[in-house]
C-alpha cells in the first residue's frame, strides 16, 4: 500500500502527531521531518502492524540528517486508538533511528478508514535518554 500525491498517512493527524507533542523539544523537529518524509505505508494482511518508509529511487532511503541518535529498535510510546466506540491498544516503534510502525494485537483496518479515529498516548512515555545514541 503506497501513498499517492496529496494522500495523508492513515491516522497521521490523530496518531503520529500526538506522539510528536510529547517528545522532548529537540526531538520534535526530527520526528516531524520523519513523518513528512513518509511516502510508503505498508501493512500486514491482518492489519495489526502498519509500517512507514521513505522510499527514494526505488529503495528505502531516509535523509541522513533526520534520524534519532539511537538507531536500535525501541518503543516510542503506546496508547489507545479509538473510533466508532471501539478501542485498540497501539504501540509506536522506532527502528534504525526513524518512526517505523504502529502495532496492535487487534486489526487496525477499521481505525485507518474511520473519520472519528483518535489516539491518546499513555501518561508514561519514552525517556529522552532512549532517543540518543548508545
Image (cartoon, rainbow, N blue to C red):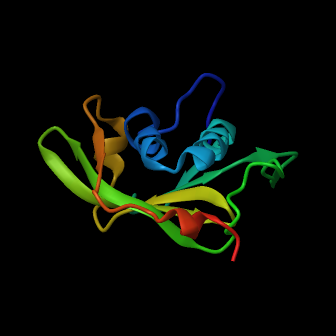
User: Seen from this angle, which residue lies furthest left?
Assistant: 85
In this rendering, position of residue 32 left or right of residue 108:
right
Quadrant, the C terminus:
bottom right
Residue 44 at x, y = what percent? 48, 62
Quarter of the rendering containing residue 51:
bottom right
Residue at 71 percent across and 63 percent down: it is 69
Residue at 88 percent across and 45 percent down: it is 57
In this rendering, position of residue 71 left or right of residue 91:
right
Residue 77 at x, y = what percent? 41, 61
Residue 63 or 21: which is nearer the viewer?
A: 21
> Is any part of residue 120 visible from this angle?
yes
Residue 69 or 78: which is nearer the viewer?
A: 69
> Is any part of residue 45 visible from this angle?
no
Rendered position, 124 above or below 9: below
User: Seen from this angle, which residue lies furthest right?
Assistant: 57
Number of numbered discs:
0
Residue 23 or 53: which is nearer the viewer?
A: 23
Residue 129 at x, y = what percent? 56, 68
Residue 10 at x, y = what percent? 45, 39
User: Seen from this angle, which residue lies furthest bottom?
Assistant: 134
Residue at 72 percent across and 47 percent down: it is 54
Quarter of the rendering containing residue 85:
top left
Residue at 53 percent across and 71 percent down: it is 74
Amino acid at each position: 500500500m503506497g501513498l499517492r500525491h496529496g494522500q495523508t498517512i492513515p491516522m497521521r493527524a490523530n496518531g503520529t502527531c500526538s506522539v510528536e507533542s510529547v517528545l522532548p523539544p529537540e526531538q520534535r523537529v526530527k520526528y516531524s521531518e520523519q513523518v513528512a518524509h513518509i511516502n510508503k505505508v505498508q501493512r500486514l494482511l491482518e492489519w495489526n502492524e502498519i509500517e512507514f518508509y521513505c522510499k527514494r529511487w526505488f529503495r528505502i532511503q531516509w535523509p541522513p540528517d533526520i534520524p534519532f541518535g539511537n538507531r536500535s529498535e525501541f518503543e516510542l510510546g503506546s496508547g489507545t486508538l479509538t473510533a466508532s466506540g471501539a478501542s485498540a491498544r497501539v504501540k509506536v516503534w522506532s527502528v534504525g533511528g526513524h518512526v517505523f510502525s504502529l502495532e496492535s494485537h487487534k486489526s487496525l483496518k477499521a481505525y485507518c478508514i474511520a473519520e472519528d479515529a483518535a489516539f491518546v498516548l499513555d501518561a508514561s512515555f519514552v525517556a529522552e535518554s532512549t532517543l540518543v545514541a548508545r
